[in-house]
Image (spheres, rainbow, N blue to C red):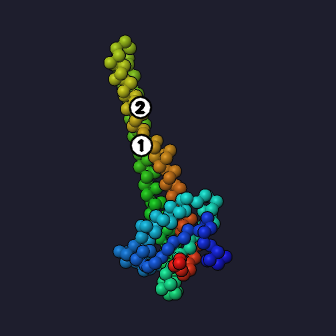
Amino acid sequence: MNTCELHGLSNVIEVRVPSLAHFYNVIDPSPDDNKELNRATDSYIMDSLREMSAEKRKSAIILLDMDSSLYTNESTRTDIERAINSHFSYRYCSELKNYKYAMSKGRRYLARGLLFLVVCLVLTSIISSFSIQNDLINAIGQSFVVIGWVALWKPVEFYLYDRRDMINDLKMLRLLETIQVKSHIWTKPF
């Protein structure tokens, strides 16, 4: 399939590249094929992939609409195409480290939360044993139960919600490490 036939397909992420300054992070001193993409380009590609169904992601393609001065310079064109995979490969490694750190922190928070809950339940039991008839003492005892469960809020939120989002992002970054990138000359609409 040639690049003209790719326009408008639902598994194609079209990225306009009018200049290198619009594509790369201009403060990154790396060679062009290892340069970091600018945030707008990175976000656009990630958001576009996120909007696709899981099935379409598997066959996704990035189509670079390049200015003719960039496209005709074969070295520049090749560097830009490689930079996408290189950028997302670096991001995958970085996010994988963040995920491992978050999992370690989540385990520590869960252990602390469970320990704190046990302490609160023991305190509730001790307080409740003093007097069953006194409403104030019962309220204090029950407040320890609530505080104990609240201590588990953060680890539960991480394991039920945040962790899943991190795993989904890692899957997308893994896909973008090897996504097919094609380019063509952008022709201005009339």
Tell me the residue at 55%/62% (across/down): 49
Q: Is residue 135 above or below residue 66?
A: above
Is residue 87 rendered to the left or right of residue 135? right
What residue is pinned by disc 2? 118
Amino acid found under the numbered disc labelled 1: Lys
Q: Position of residue 24 (x, y in %)?
A: 42, 74
Mark sitting earlier along the chain (2/1): 2
Q: Which of the numbered marks, if any, corresponds to residue 35?
A: none
Residue closer to the observer: 34 or 101: 34
Q: Residue furthest right?
A: 1
Residue closer to the observer: 92 or 28: 28
Dot 1, how many residues are within 10 Å of its Cα: few (below 14), some (14-19), or many (20+)?
some
Q: Is residue 41 above or below residue 95?
A: below
The quadrant of the image that shows the N terminus is: bottom right
What residue is pinned by disc 1? 154
Amino acid found under the numbered disc labelled 2: Val
Q: Position of residue 126 (x, y in %)?
A: 37, 21
